[in-house]
Amino acid sequence: MLSVSRRTDIPNYYSEWFFNRIKDGFAYVRNPMNAHQVSKINITPEVVDCIVFWTKNPEPMINRSEELTSYNYYSQFTLTGYGKDMECNVPHKKEKMIPIFQELSKKIGVKKVIWRYDPIIFTKKYTMEYHLKAFEKIAVALKGSTEKCVISFVDVYAKDNGMIIGSCAESIDLDECGIKHNCSKYDPESPILCGTLDENDKITERKVKSLKEQQLSIFD
């Protein structure tokens, strides 16, 4: 299984990079616990049983789905009722995102698009009643475009001390908050996302194999 990606929204922000990786058949991934340890990962159809895309906006990829014909894949599409105060970079839900969801469903099939209404956060504005109404409106609009919805509630992680936080695809200057940009290092032609390799990096090819059951023949 190839996850694209729970660390960042690759379909929305880095789709060109992803399709270049598909074309070349491999990607480099830096170990978050050891900055100079880099894995080379084979992502050819022979070893990738399925690709799962995680995104809030798959529009940049919709018209390039033919480049994925050699792969099994599906999309986890997050669509919630939050406003710009919570999702400032997500286009208007009713005018833009619901039609994109419907278009993607028609393009790749109902079974390949899973609706995610998550994370669910309760505030003075986003009450239980608010979420119930928002969920119902979106569900009605998506009827016939998906067969499954996944929900989750926000988890607050306590262990966040001593870590450098980086923003992804944010134009706002967050330096005063201690948050640094990383998109300036993005190169769609690079085998590694948002960064470059240097002489101190050690590249190791990670062994991967398909988990598909091989069909046996009585003639073998």
Image: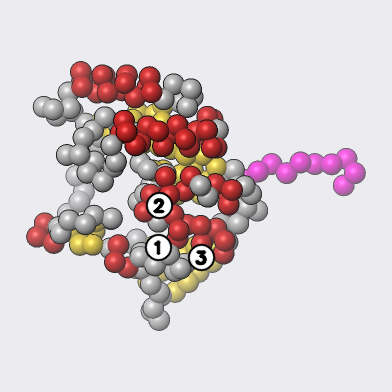
Q: CA distance from mark 2 to mark 3?
A: 18 Å
Residue 155 located within the stretch drawn in magenta: no
Where does label 1 land, which residue?
193
Q: Residues in magenta?
A: 208-220
Q: Is residue 126 above or below residue 129?
A: below
State which mark lies toward you, 2 or 3: 2
The secondary structure type at the circle numbered 3 is strand
Q: From the viewer's side, name the closer residue of 28 and 145.
A: 145
Residue 125: x and y in percent read: 13, 27
Q: Is residue 195 above or below residue 55?
A: below
Where does label 3 land, which residue?
40
Report the side of 133 relative to 71 (left or right).
left
Q: CA distance from mark 1 to mark 2?
A: 9 Å
Identify the mark nearer the N-term, 2 or 3.
2
Residue 15: x and y in percent read: 44, 54
* Discs 1, 2 touching: Cβ within 8 Å: yes
Residue 148: x and y in percent read: 46, 26
**Residue 152 can be seen in this image:** no
